[in-house]
Amino acid sequence: MPVLEPNPQGSQKKLLLVLGLMLGVTVVVAIIASIAAPR
């Protein structure tokens, strides 16, 4: 199985999902941290 497929469809969607999930988690953590931070 090649590392870089010429026309990836399933793996590209999975990679996009993982990147989106990471971004979403980062945003949620940042929001929680800003709320929990002492003013």
Image (tube, grey):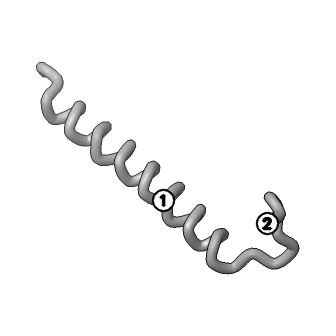
**Amino acid, disc 2:** Met
Quadrant position of residue 2: bottom right
Please provide percent x and percent y for residue 24. 38, 54
Residue at image position (59%, 62%) is 15
Q: Are marks 1 and 2 in contact (CB under 8 Å)?
A: no
Secondary element at tag 1: helix
Viewer-nearest residue: 32 or 6: 6
Left/right of residue 13 with respect to residue 23 in the rendered view: right
Using the image, tell me which numbered label, if any, was put on residue 36: none
The quadrant of the picture occupied by the N terminus is: bottom right
**Amino acid, disc 1:** Gly
Q: Which residue is mark 2?
A: 1
Viewer-nearest residue: 1 or 19: 1
Viewer-nearest residue: 23 or 5: 5
Please provide percent x and percent y for residue 13. 59, 73
Using the image, tell me which numbered label, if any, was put on residue 20: 1
Residue at image position (82%, 69%) is 5
Q: Disc 1 to disc 2, how far (Cα)? A: 25 Å
Give the vertical position of 28 relative to 14 (above or below).
above
